[in-house]
Image (cartoon, rainbow, N blue to C red):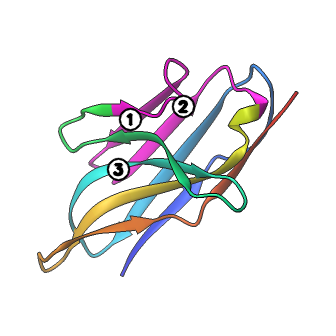
Amino acid sequence: QVQLVESGGGLVQAGGSLGLSCLASGNIFSIDDMGWYRQAPGKGRVLVATITSDNNKKYGDSGKGRFAISRDDAKNTVALQMNSLKPEDTDVYYCYALIKKIPPGPQFRYWGQGTQVTVSS
């Protein structure tokens, strides 16, 4: 079994900051890309940020210049620091990871359960 658990969402005023964290656990052999998507009710998931196993980072349009993604491979975690938050950043945020399980086999994308981020004006 592999599980991703997010933490750190909540309510913040516009202009404030929030940090999200996601822990991957279970019978993990290796983790490739990790990252974050966001989703509004009734809509598809939209890229927020991704980070590869060699630390290359990519940001979606909404978070460029304001968000920072990082990972700690020793702890199997990925984090998203969100600064200068705006009401339009309000959504459910999902972490994901591309994981090979033990014993090594195909790589699959796993998702967390989602964490609500609400930015008040």
Disc 2 residue crowd, few under 14, some 14–19, many 20+, Cα 10 Å: some
State the SS at label 2: strand
Residue 6 quadrant: bottom right
* Left or right position of 43 against 102: right
Picture coordinates of residue 9, whole percent (x, y): 68, 47
Separation of disc 3 and disc 1 at Cα?
Answer: 9 Å
Picture coordinates of residue 64, whole percent (x, y): 49, 23
Residue 10 quadrant: top right
Which mark identifies residue 34? 3
Towards the viewer: 14 or 27:
14
Whether 68 is drawn above or below 105: the answer is: above
Whether 89 is drawn above or below 31: the answer is: above
Q: How many marks?
A: 3
Towards the viewer: 56 or 79:
56
Whether 81 is drawn above or below 43: the answer is: above
> What residue does disc 1 label?
70
Name the quadrant of the N terminus. Answer: bottom left
Disc 1 residue crowd, few under 14, some 14–19, many 20+, Cα 10 Å: many
Decide which of tag 2 and tag 1 comes sooner along the chain.
1
Towards the viewer: 76 or 114:
114
State the SS at label 1: strand
Q: Amino acid at mark 2?
A: Gln
Region in magenta: 58-87
Separation of disc 2 and disc 1 at Cα?
Answer: 8 Å
Q: Residue at x 73, y 26 (%)?
A: 86
Disc 2 vs disc 1: Cβ atoms closer than 8 Å?
A: yes
Decide which of tag 3 and tag 2 comes sooner along the chain.
3
Q: Residue at x 58, y 49 (%)?
A: 38
Disc 3 residue crowd, few under 14, some 14–19, many 20+, Cα 10 Å: many
Q: Residue at x 88, y 27 (%)?
A: 121
